[in-house]
Amino acid sequence: MAVLPVVRFPDPRLKLVAKSVESFGEALTKICADMLETMYAAEGVGLAATQVNVQQRIIVLDISEDRSQVLCLINPIIIKAEDEIVWEEGCLSFPGVYAKVKRSAKVKVEFYDIQGERQEMEADGLTAVCLQHEIDHLNGITFCWYPRNCSRSITCANCCTVPYHSLFDSTRSSTRTWTKIICFCGKNMCSRE
């Protein structure tokens, strides 16, 4: 297993829509193992393949403290969603940025497992939030691209709060144009590496 580099904002690859997985086998198993290793190394609870520059519809999750609830979902689709929940989310592609996001409280997801068998699962709470967050990544969407869903601000882990609209070039927000986020404390929250 290998720890892969995480694609970070403002990298335009975060806007790419992943392609469906067509082939199941050793290569897919390795990608999933590397994604899990990367997620654990970054102390995350979910990771989409697009976040490690693999443009395939793969997500991994593990919300447990002891790394015992591993989920690897191939070509996941939300087929049912109900109720609402607001959850403060972070993202490995947006280090130090957190936003309260309105999501469905319960979801039903159809997917394929690592062996290529069709599965369905129902989830609520943190698992439901993570599934929606990671599936959004596969569609080229991040949690901060929905200001109507976010609370009125995102939080700088360094010190304070910044208006969420500073994420966008207001004249081109429909095309998801990147701009820098610079907190009032002077910390550049989303610089290129």
Image (spheres, grey):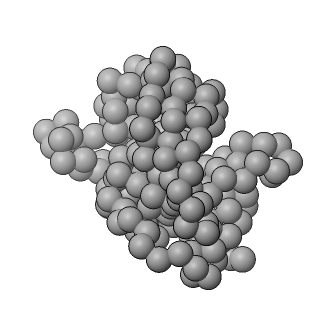
Q: Position of residue 165 (x, y in %)?
A: 31, 31
> In the rendered picture of this protein, how many numbered marks are placed on residues?
0
**Which residue sits at x=54%, y=26%?**
106
Residue 157 visible in the displayed image:
no
**Quadrant location of residue 105?**
top right
Residue 76 visible in the displayed image:
yes
Q: Classify residue 97 as left or right of residue 178.
A: right
Q: Position of residue 12 (x, y in %)?
A: 32, 61
Q: Which quadrant holds the N terminus? A: bottom right
Q: Position of residue 153 (x, y in %)?
A: 44, 24
| Residue reaching furthest to the bottom | 26
Between 130 and 180, the residue placed more toward the observer is 130
Q: Classify residue 60 as left or right of residue 83.
A: right
**Which residue sits at x=78%, y=43%?**
64
**Quadrant location of residue 116?**
bottom right
Q: Classify residue 55 as left or right of residue 28.
A: left
Q: Position of residue 69 (x, y in %)?
A: 76, 48
**Which residue sits at x=34%, y=53%?**
140
Q: Classify residue 16 as left or right of residue 46.
A: left
| Residue reaching furthest to the right | 66
Image height check: is 160 above or below 35? above
